[in-house]
Amino acid sequence: MTELQQPLSQLQETSGPLLDAQKMQFWMDKAVAWDQVGSAQTLKDISRHLRGLTDFLQQVLTQISNTGSTAETMKELPCLGQILGRLCWNPYVTVGDTNRGLLLQCLLGLYSENPSNALERKANQWIRKVLCRLATEDDDPAAQILMKSTGVPPKEYHLRVLKKMVKQHQENIEKTCCSKKSIDQRCSCDVILTTSEVFVPLLDCPEASPVICSLLQRPGTSFTDALSEDFLDALNSTDLRLAVDETALVSVWYHSLPRLEEAVLDLLEFATSTGSAPQNLEQHISKTQLPKACAHHCSMFLVVNDIFRSILKQAEGNLAVHSVIQTFTRCFLKELEELQPRTAASLKAFFPQSPTSLLVPLLTLPSEMPQEAWKNHLEWLTASLQRLAEQEEEEEGDSQSSRGHHNVFETWFLLVQCSHWVQVAGELLVTSEAEPCSNLLWLMTFYYHPTNRWHCRAALLEEAKEAWRHLRTLSSASVRPLPTDHLQPLITLLSLKPQRPSAPLLTLSLMVYCAIFCQLPHSQSVEIFQTVVHAAGLLHEAACVLNSLQHRLNEGSCSSRDTVHVRIKKLQSTVTHMQAGVNPHTPHNRG
């Protein structure tokens, strides 16, 4: 919640210095100077100080709420009434919802329900008049005569005036800006600059949307050279999603790095806060238009990828982060495929840091090749990754060289974006008759622990092999139900290790793939899954792995046997009941 959204009760708790005489005099001078609202210089000064005015009004509101009476407030701040009065009469101050709302709160805070003296009674009369002004904005005598003669209500009159002003500014932009067909020409900087300054207070006003969109979409080779700096600053702190159309929003992303970063972080927040299923996450990401914008603008995609890289380095084992990156990449590739070949940049332009030899093989979907070719394809991918990993290990002793580590990270980042091959590796690991499957285990180990931090890659691979041996043993055990000591080694492997935080996720994934693709009866695979996951406390992580795999299966990226879908739904139901604290084997849910 931002400061602008803090309720009055929170403002009352805010501790800070009282408003001093110097600050009050500063805003008194500004309020007087801004009375000349028709001057271009005055409009520019108002735009520049709007954010500071918001902070000032919040401080005023805090002081009012912390003072016992209106008389006491006016004694401490003698010129407050003049400042608020002048600001309330200034249409460029009151047009924005934020400052208009703060002014209303200040006036309401000064209003005395039971005035105890002449000062408070006079203040109440003045406040009622100002509130009427803020509510109708019809104090202009000329406007009153016009409204009376036309029979137009005050609110409708002012709305019409605003729309007319917007239309005039939009026509000026269209006259001075070149046709979109002549994109190399430049727009008239003076008109754009003046218009952008005038519309700073109107950025969050829906009626001003046409002009704001025109400013953002105007043709020309530069976006920021002619726009007011105050306009650009306000642009980065205003919620434009409801005020501009999709094309204008894409233009904002393209030219404003803070807004693009905000859009990406919003995706991550959506995934982590709601725990959305992959199909819901995909719908949400597609609806934002960000993948489509990235497909049309290669530079934008590169920035988004850099943001993902930075987050991934800090949250290597976070499944929600993985899910957002995978889903976004999938949506992006779909949008890129829909573009005409001559208008789309090459794949290498979008993934310049990824090893060229691995780019197409990883971006290729499993559904785009015969299932019989999956294993050979994965073996080739694994061999290529192993060579990069070996190169990294050879260069670890050379403090001057970081090329190997960079290549390994970029390849892993691409593998995270194209995790469908990791899921195929998990399926083949369970269903392959031939032994050994060490290459598939190595690939999955690399996915969950790409770096050789603490030189533990080999140790993690050994743990993966041990977990796989336990799972194979459990799958072939004939004694049912399984004794607890048979499951304890697997539960131990799923326990969190500070030096290898990704190890439990790898073991959990192996267990999920085994429960889904093995030949055990449903009841037995669910029994193992339920006991181990519950003991390890990895219900949320298990749900993430199951949901992700189900989404891939529904898209046709893996095998789609009916028994596989039945098993996934059964395991999902088990996790849901466990999360709700209900025994999944109980015939009726307890109400």
Image: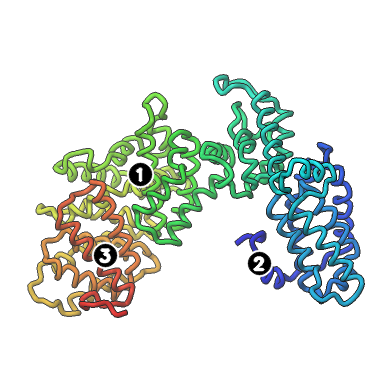
Do the residues under discs 1 and 2 have CB atoms within 8 angstroms?
no
What residue do we see at 89% from left, 50% from top? 32
Q: Earlier in the sequence, mark 1 or mark 2?
A: 2
Q: Where on the picture, by quarter, is residue 182? A: top right
* Mark 1 Cα-neighbour bin, 10 Å: few <14, some 14–19, many ≥20: some
Q: Amino acid at mark 2?
A: Pro
Q: Earlier in the sequence, mark 2 or mark 3?
A: 2
Q: Position of residue 302 (x, y in %)?
A: 47, 39
Q: Nearer the viewer, mark 2 or mark 3?
A: 2
Q: Amino acid at mark 3?
A: Gln
**On-image quarter of the C terminus:** bottom left
- In depth, the one of 196 and 103 nearer the eye is 103
Q: Amino acid at mark 1?
A: Arg
Q: Secondary structure at mark 1?
A: helix
Q: Nearer the viewer, mark 1 or mark 2?
A: 2
- Most distant residue in the left direction: 478
Q: Position of residue 344 (x, y in %)?
A: 41, 29
Q: Secondary structure at mark 2?
A: loop
Q: What residue sits right under mark 2 in the picture?
A: 7
CA–CA distance in space, label 2 to label 3: 41 Å
Q: Secondary structure at mark 3?
A: helix
* Mark 2 Cα-neighbour bin, 10 Å: few <14, some 14–19, many ≥20: few
Relative to 196, is 385 on the left or the right? Answer: left
Q: What residue sits right under mark 1 in the picture?
A: 330
Q: Nearer the viewer, mark 1 or mark 3?
A: 3
CA–CA distance in space, label 1 to label 3: 24 Å
Query: Is residue 329 placed above or below 473 in the rendered structure?
Result: above
Q: What residue sits right under mark 3 in the picture?
A: 572
- In depth, the one of 312 and 570 nearer the eye is 570
What residue do we see at 45% from left, 54% from top? 313
Query: Is residue 102 placed above or below 68 in the rendered structure?
Result: above
